Amino acid sequence: MKIFLRLGRCFAVSAIAATSQLLVSPDVLADPSLVDIARDESREAAKKLAPGIISTEENAELNAVFSPDGQEFYFCRLVDGIYRLFRMDKLSSGKWSNPSRVNLKKMDEFEIVDPWITPDGKQMLYISNAPTDAFQAGSVNIWTMKREGNGWGTPHVLSSPINSQLNEIYPMPVESGNLYFNSNRNSRGDDRDIFVATQKNGKFREPVNLGPPVSSPYREGDVFVAPDESYLIVTSAKPGGFGKSDLYISYRQEDGTWGETINLGPTVNSEEHDYTPVVSPDGKYFFFTRSADIYWITTADLGIPQAE
C-alpha cells in the first residue's frame, strides 16, 4: 500500500521494510519529560529524543504528543510501510513504559498519523487516508475518537466543513474550541495553507485561511498553536531559510492578527526538512521531526514564551 505524500519527507511514496518493536527496560527513561536533561552541549542544537527507544536508527518516527496531564506520550512509527500509533505511559515510579502499539480496530490497515489530544483530554484527533463514504478515495482526512477508560473508542471521520475532497493534515485543537490544520483545499497547485475553524453552538463553521504572513505561496505545513492562541509555530518552505523546510514562530497581535513569521534559527532548523512542531503541556520543551527522527530542545533555549 502506498502512503500519502506530505511536506518534506515525512510520508514517502514507497513502502519501507518491516520494523520490530524494541524491548528496552523502562528504567532507561527515568525523567518524566522523556528527555535527557544532562546535555553536554546544552545550548548549541536540538538532540534526538530518547535514542534507541523512540528515535531509532532502523525505523522512521515522527510526532511527539503528550496527554494534557502529562501521563501519556504518543508518537508514530513506520511499520510494514504504514505509519502506526505508539504509546508510552508514565508509571507510578515516575519512569515510562516501553513503547507499545495502539490498535485502532478496523483502522489498523491504514495510516495513523499526527495525533493530538483535545485540551480536556477527552478526544484524540489524527489524520488517515482510510476510505470514507463522504470523501473521495485517497483523500487525507481528520478523524476523532473519544476516550474510553484508559484507551480510545471507535474512530469517526469528521464531517464537512472540516474535511474536504482534498487533504487536511495536522489537526490542532485549542482551549477556545477552535481547530487549526493545514490543507490544500484552496491551493495553488501543490501549495498548502493554514486554516482555522471556529465553533458556533457546538458546530464548526467554514474554515478560514489564516492568510499572510502565516499562509504564503511557499507551502506551509504542520502548525502548532499555543493553547491560548498567543503564538503559533509553523513549517514553511519559503525561501531564505536554512533548509528544505524550516520552523517559524508568529505571535498574536493586539488586534487579533498574526505577526510576521520569525525563523527559529539553526538550533532547530537544518539543511533538511524540519516539521511536526510541538510544545509540551508544561511549556518547557519543544519537539519536532527531522530525517525520520524526533528531536527536542528546551523552549528557554529558543526564547519561546512559557505559560505563567
Image (tube, rainbow, N blue to C red):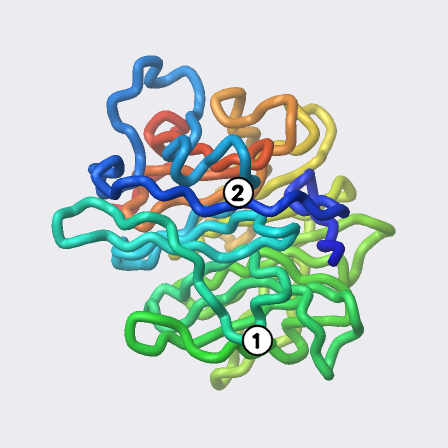
In the image, is residue 278 above or below residue 290?
below
The residue carrying pointer 2 sits among few (fewer than 14), some (14 to 19) or many (20 or more) residues within 10 Å by Cα, namely many
Q: CA distance from mark 2 to mark 1?
A: 22 Å
**Position of residue 34 measured from the top left corner of the image (x, y, whole percent):** 30, 40
Mark found first going from the N terminus, 2 or 1: 2
Q: Is residue 248 visible?
A: no
Residue displayed at 25% across by 22% down: 38
Q: Is residue 153 left or right of residue 199?
A: left
Label 2's element? strand
**Position of residue 152 measured from the top left corner of the image (x, y, whole percent):** 40, 73
Q: Which residue is mark 1?
A: 106
**Position of residue 23 measured from the top left corner of the image (x, y, whole percent):** 36, 43
In the image, is residue 286 above or below residue 185?
above
For residue 28, which quarter of the picture? top left
Residue displayed at 58% across by 56% down: 170
For residue 108, which quarter of the picture? bottom right
Identify the amino acid type marked 1.
Lys
Q: Is residue 98 left or right of residue 211?
A: left
- Residue in the foreground of this view, choosing between 11 and 23: 23
Q: Is residue 143 visible?
A: yes
Count every numbered label the image shows and give the total.
2
Q: Quadrant of the N terminus?
A: bottom right
- Residue in the foreground of this view, choosing between 153 and 297: 153
Residue lying at the far right of the rendered structure: 189
Identify the amino acid type marked 2.
Glu
Residue displayed at 28% across by 55% down: 89
Residue lying at the far left of the rendered structure: 93
Residue displayed at 73% across by 83% down: 133
Q: Closer to us: mark 2 or mark 1? A: 1
Q: Which residue is mark 2?
A: 61
Q: Is residue 191 left or right of residue 193?
A: right
